[in-house]
Image (cartoon, rainbow, N blue to C red):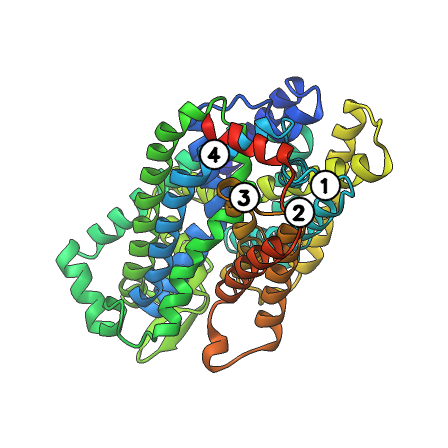
Amino acid sequence: MGTATLITFIVYLIGMLAIGFISYRLTSNLSDYVLGGRRLGPGVAALSAGASDMSSWLLLGLPGAIYVSGLGSAWLAVGLAIGAYLNWQFVARRLRIFTEVANDSITLPDYLENRFRDSSHILRVVSALVILIFFTFYTSSGLVGGAKLFESSFDLGYNQALWIGAIVTISYTFIGGFLAVSWTDFIQGILMFLALIAVPIVAISELGGWSSAIDAVGAISPDHLSMVQGVGAISIISSLAWGLGYFGQPHILVRFMALRSPKDVPKARLIGMGWMIIGLYGAIFTGLFGLAFIATQDVDGLSAVGAQLTSEGGFQALADGEKIFIVFSQILFHPVIAGILLAAILSAIMSTIDSQLLVSSSALAEDFYKAIFRKNASERELVWIGRFAVALIALIALLLAGNPDSTVLGLVSYAWAGFGAAFGPTIILSLFWKNITRNGALAGMIVGAVTVVVWADMLQGGIFDLYEIVPGFLFNLIVAVVVSKMGTPPSDEIVAEFEEAARR
């Protein structure tokens, strides 16, 4: 990495840490630390939700999948766009209202306990456990992405790169909490958006325009230009099913909870969906045209930016397709712009890791420490427990990310399925069906989470190649409805609260 690129990169990191320190001054209690006091505007909430959602997979994982497999992998983007829209359209406003009505709940486990009047705390504890388990894997995916960035850009060993990226992200989350995370996510979202517009446009220009770029890809691999060639029905269903995950992602749902008013949802939805769709197109074109670009480049020039090559069907290709955006940034742009683009990759990584660490820390502080061990804990004490939880969870995720052969998309898919299957049906039913019971929600959540683990780790081949979120989501929904109908109906108090929230 050149000096100008390095300086630009460092300035960005200092700016993110500065936001963390400013937010520290505005954080006085646990509600501020984990929910920002419910005062996010629609723009910040939308870009913060998008940036924390998309993570490094938008700049590394998705372009890498398109680079390797072609437009057949774009079904995943279609599924995500549909799922995100439905989440904003039907869940966002209702969840914002319900969490306030349900005793001003500030975390997802807190909401579920209050929604079902669960004095045993079992619903809170189980949901907090699900959050801690799957967010550890999710956080690991971001750390792997950060390691790939630092490894390629700074010529570092994988483990060195892993620790440097982790320390930067953990620092401002530890210090500033939700406000730091949301404002840095807002800035990072803008940076990611601009990067995903700039890189494919310049790449297409370098290949001689749109038609020439398409022809160049087709000459190398015609199948790359088809969304159906060589893609089976199970693969398409699995990719589209990623959209189901949105209804259960705690780090996205918490943005809905933090909106200053339910009336801000339509504006936030417009901003968030516009950002997402353009970003997805940018990621797809980056991977698609990267195939033709790399195949025509001088080997020495690629080696100079740390690109490791392999031979694929008579043409040269990247050994690790997930680094295509990094290579583009360093080859196509002035060193200062390259520094900004590389900072955009780190932005994508940081914006998700910080959100995941924050939700995990709130699960430990609010849903374990306060609920079970220290019911009278002071607000200041809970904030510091949350901060130390950030460090602890990050350390475990670092250990999981220690394998240099890990892929960003692989780790994300497992955690995404876990949350979608465990929480998705539970959240939807809690918001739209007044007859769901505590036992129904609990049974469905456990079945959904266990199905993902068993399906992903033990069942393979044929129908079992279906993405684990599909059976997990379906089984959760069925079990939650059946158990609720078999048990004692919800109390009049719970039904009255549901109807009050539904009227708003």
Which of the two marks, 2 or 3, is nearer to us in this view? 2
Tell me where residue 389 sits by quadrant: top right
Q: Label 3 to label 4, Cα distance in Å? A: 24 Å
Q: Position of residue 344 (x, y in %)?
A: 44, 41
- Element type at marker 4? helix
Foreground label between 2 and 4: 2
Residue found farthest to the left: 211
Q: Nearer the viewer, residue 33 or 105?
A: 105
Q: What type is the residue that disc 2 sits on?
A: Arg
Which residue type carries mark 4?
Arg
Find numbered disc 2 in the image and state the secondary structure of the residue it sits on: helix
| Residue 305 in view (yes/no) | no
Cα–Cα span, label 2 and label 3: 30 Å
Local crowd size for mark 4, using a 10 Å CA cut-off: few (<14), some (14–19), many (≥20): many
The nearer-to-camera label among 3 and 4 is: 4
Disc on res. 94: 4
Q: Is residue 218 above or below residue 248?
A: below
Q: Which mark is residue 352?
A: 3
Q: What residue is disc 2 on? A: 438
Mark before the other along the chain sequence, 3 or 1: 1
* Circle nearer the N terminus (3, 4): 4
The reply, left or right, for residue 409 in relation to residue 82 is: right
The residue that mark 1 highlights is 118
| Contact check, label 1 and label 2, Cβ < 8 Å | yes
* Label 2 or label 4, whichever comes before in sequence order: 4
Q: CA distance from mark 3 to mark 1?
A: 31 Å
Left or right side of 124 for 293:
left
Q: Amino acid at mark 3?
A: Thr
In the image, is 471 to the left or to the right of 116? left
Residue ID at (60%, 46%): 165
